[in-house]
Image (tube, rainbow, N blue to C red):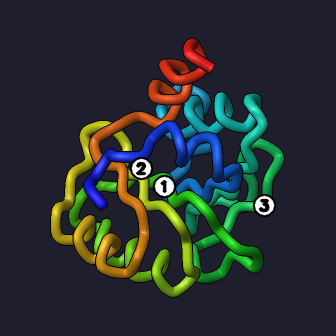
Amino acid sequence: MNINENIPEILKSFRKIAVVGISDKPQRASHDVSWFMQNHGYHIIPVNPGLDEVLGEKCYPSLVEIPEPIEIVDIFRRPEYIDEIVDQAIEKKAKVIWMQQGIVNENAAQKAIDAGMQVVMDRCIKTEYRILMSGW
């Protein structure tokens, strides 16, 4: 499986997105993208240790503390934090690691692939959804 290979299938198949590094500030990309996806039928699970709630959803300090299954892990953190996030995603048996636009970590991507996960890297989930939605 190659990186960024199955974006249409990912967006059609998986509806539960844990957003790591989400902000409660509407002007931040993580908040805007999450709001957009939430308003297009996706279930957003905020992950940020400094927040209690975002977009009307309980916010968790880490992926491993989320009490329900996760499908997509959408990451808004710097590349040096991605390895730990991927380790937690593997522990949670997530299906997809999605590193937002501008975020690249080849090592973590390979670790996720080796664990059987799909990987999207350096792409915005909102942008990809909008492109695909125009063709659906």
Across and down, in percent, residue 6 comes to: 42, 46
Q: For the point 70% across and 50% down, which residue is it?
A: 15
Residue denoted by label 1? 21
CA gap, disc 3 and disc 1: 14 Å
Tell me which numbered mark, 2 or 3, is placed earlier along the sequence: 3
Which residue is located at x 76 percent, y 75 percent? 68
Locate residue 131, reporting x and y percent: 48, 19
CA gap between label 2 and label 1 equals 5 Å
- Residue located beneath label 3 in the image: 58
The percent position of residue 118, horizontal first and vertical second, equals: 41, 61
The residue wearing badge 2 is 76
Identity of the amino acid at label 3?
Answer: Lys
Query: Between 16 and 49, which is closer to the camera in this rendering?
Result: 16
Callout count = 3
In the rendered view, tell whether residue 25 sits above or below residue 15: above
Checking the image for residue 10, the label placed there is: none
Please say if 120 is above or below 117.
above
Q: Is residue 1 left or right of residue 104?
A: right
Task: Tell which circle, 2 or 1, labels the residue nearer the N-terminal end.
Answer: 1
> Left or right of 64: which side holds 1?
left
